[in-house]
């Protein structure tokens, strides 16, 4: 039997193709959702699912959750005295799902379709594949989560060919994707998200309200109370999905502390989180160049979209009602079940091939002259931009910068930062050029990137016909790493207060640089270069003028109405 599996950060689920449709398979507790939690008992026994989740507060050092965030890395996960990798712990979850399905269906599960986030790098995909293999499954295919959601909503059977916007708010991650079907090919046109936003953050909001009203001593010295408060908040929040008000209750020092929270109060306190839902939606639409009106459906998936305040925010954002006809907790597993069914009935399979997008920008380091003629290196020139549909090949032409230069070196980077220092270096390639005046020799640099994660960089000097090539396998390409490196760098730098306004403007411009693509990105890069030049003059009037001009330009850009 072939199954479809949603291997989630918080919860996992398994489905198969049944009588004319996908159906979920319950676990041994009779539940469709299995928490992605693993715990090791004193006897060396592995617990998976609800039991493991419930052990977490008591045996934190023997229990692992949210390990999907680490898949594809070698970071050790300690369970008792034993060290595991994220792919091994994930394999334990898959094994448990497989065993439950075999018991329920009375049939051996031999192979699976497993879903992964659209932004997963090749390394994370390979690790997920290996997790399946470690669990004794033949992994027939990995499917992007938003693609699976769209399949559950029948995107493959529709007359219209308009794209779906998949809005996925889970326990700790938020993903927005635009999925389109064309000639039997499903394509993720763009994906954006916030990997630190989900149901857990909304729990913190409830804890915050309760803490203030009940004066809960939630300091670092009280981990037990903290965990109790978190669990109570989860209950309150779920109750608020059904009712206009719910009670938050904890027992502390034999005393029952309780307070009633209304939906309105929750909504007001959660406003900053609800605001954060907007930016990734805008980014996905911008990257795909598709307007909200062009979407055939706004599809809600992920358990946290069951919160009415989230639905309200989405409705307001799009000025129309989202579709949640398929249970948001089950949509991805059901879609994996559809794909498993197609796979089993070989005939249908060819109709759906899945293409992918490049999850990050790839480019080279360049030098540029400022207004005063000074030469500055360290700038990042993206060649393949984030969300380019793969396979893709793009070429950029560069000129020499020095007179009598006899070779050109291309340093290759991955990331979204404007300066290469904030990105990850993947390698370099050097090519000889005929010695001439500065700017007189041209060199073409072509990037070719395919779905298997191989990046080929070809450089050619058209004048001499000289060529060089470097092939980079995507070891070391990890969106998370760049982010971690950037925040580590940001934490180190301490700017003098009197430059705060300038630094804030640069930070905003750099944030915009990362958020926009194409001409807009290039324009922001020019604004930044201009601003740096003006700052170097130390002329307060020129600086004030530039600040005002750039602020206005950024306001115009960010205020652009896509919704
Ligand atoms: P993931 O994709 O991270 O594995 P899920 O899609 O399973 O996560 O979503 C888990 C989140 O959904 C949790 O934060 C949980 O609190 C939330 N959730 C589930 N049911 C409800 C509900 N009825 N009301 C509010 N939140 C819910
Ligand atoms: Mg999910």
Image (cartoon, grey):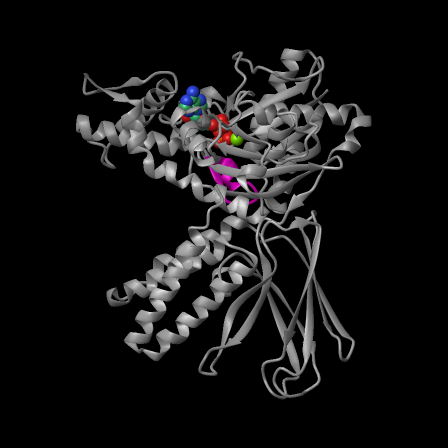
Q: Nearer the viewer, residue 12 or 523?
A: 523
Percent from the top left, x then y, of residue 2? 71, 23
What residue do we see at 61% from left, 85% from top? 438
Question: Is residue 73 a member of the stretch shown in magenta?
Answer: yes
* Left or right: residue 377 compared with residue 411: left
> Visible in this render: residue 38?
no
Q: Nearer the viewer, residue 400 or 466?
A: 400
Q: Quadrant of the N terminus?
A: top right
What residue do we see at 66% from left, 48% from top? 389
Question: Is residue 466 a member of the stretch shown in magenta?
Answer: no
Q: Nearer the viewer, residue 250 or 147?
A: 147
The mark tally for this picture is 0
> Visible in this render: residue 309?
yes
Residue 290 image-quadrant placement: top right
Image: 317 above or below 152:
below
What residue do we see at 42% from left, 50% from top? 559
Residue 172 image-quadrant placement: top left
Image: 522 above or below 160:
below
Percent from the top left, x then y, of residue 494? 30, 63
What residue do we see at 74% from left, 33% from top? 352
Percent from the top left, x then y, of residue 139? 70, 32
Percent from the top left, x then y, of residue 326? 56, 21
Magenta range: 67-78
């Amino acid at each position: 039997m072939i199954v479809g599996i949603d291997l989630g950060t918080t919860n996992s689920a398994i489905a198969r193709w049944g009588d004319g449709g996908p159906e979920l398979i319950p676990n041994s507790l009779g539940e469709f959702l299995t928490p992605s939690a693993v715990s090791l008992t004193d006897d060396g026994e592995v617990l998976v699912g609800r039991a493991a989740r419930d052990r977490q507060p008591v045996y934190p050092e023997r229990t692992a959750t949210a390990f999907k965030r680490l898949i594809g890395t070698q970071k050790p996960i300690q369970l008792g005295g034993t060290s595991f990798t994220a792919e091994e712990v994930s394999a334990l979850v898959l094994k448990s799902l497989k065993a439950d399905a075999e018991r329920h269906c009375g049939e051996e599960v031999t192979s699976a379709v497993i879903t992964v986030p659209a932004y997963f790098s090749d390394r994370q995909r390979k690790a997920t594949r290996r997790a399946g293999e470690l669990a004794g499954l033949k992994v027939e295919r990995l499917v992007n989560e938003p693609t699976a959601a769209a399949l559950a909503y029948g995107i493959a059977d529709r007359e219209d060919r308009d794209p779906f916007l998949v809005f996925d708010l889970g326990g700790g991650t938020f993903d927005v994707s635009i999925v389109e079907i064309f000639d039997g090919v499903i394509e993720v046109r763009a994906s954006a998200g916030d990997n630190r936003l989900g149901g857990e953050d909304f729990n913190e909001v409830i804890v915050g309200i309760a803490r203030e009203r009940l004066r809960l001593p939630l300091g670092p010295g009280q981990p037990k109370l903290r965990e109790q408060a978190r669990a109570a908040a989860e209950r309150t929040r779920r109750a608020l999905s059904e009712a206009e008000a719910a009670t938050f209750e904890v027992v502390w020092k034999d005393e029952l502390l309780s307070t009633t929270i209304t939906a309105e109060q929750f909504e007001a306190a959660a406003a900053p989180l609800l605001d954060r839902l907007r930016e990734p939606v805008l980014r996905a639409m911008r990257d795909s160049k598709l307007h909200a009106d062009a979407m055939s459906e706004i599809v809600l998936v992920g358990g946290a979209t069951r919160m009415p305040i989230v639905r309200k925010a989405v409705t307001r954002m799009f000025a129309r009602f989202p579709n949640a006809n398929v249970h948001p907790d089950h949509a991805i597993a059901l879609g994996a079940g559809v794909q498993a069914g197609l796979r089993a009935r070989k005939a249908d399979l060819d109709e759906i091939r899945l293409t992918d997008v490049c999850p990050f920008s790839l480019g080279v380091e360049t030098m540029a002259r400022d207004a005063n003629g000074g030469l500055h290196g360290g700038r990042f020139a993206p060649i393949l931009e984030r969300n380019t549909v793969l396979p893709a090949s793009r070429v950029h032409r560069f000129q020499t910068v020095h007179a009598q230069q006899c070779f050109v070196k291309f340093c290759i980077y991955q990331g979204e930062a404007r300066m290469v220092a904030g990105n990850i270096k993947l390698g370099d390639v050097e090519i000889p050029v005929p010695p001439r005046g500065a700017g007189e020799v041209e060199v073409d640099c072509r990037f070719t990137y395919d779905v298997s994660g191989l990046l080929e960089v070809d450089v050619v000097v058209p004048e001499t016909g000289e060529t060089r090539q470097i092939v980079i396998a995507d070891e070391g390409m990890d969106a998370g790493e760049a982010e971690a490196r950037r925040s580590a760098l940001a934490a180190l730098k301490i700017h003098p207060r009197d430059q705060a306004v300038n630094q804030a403007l640069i930070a905003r411009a750099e944030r915009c640089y990362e958020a926009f693509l194409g001409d807009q990105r290039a324009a922001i890069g020019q604004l930044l270069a201009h601003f740096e030049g003006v700052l170097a003059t130390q002329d307060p009037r020129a600086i004030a003028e530039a600040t005002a001009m750039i602020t206005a330009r950024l306001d115009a850009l960010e205020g652009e109405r896509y919704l």
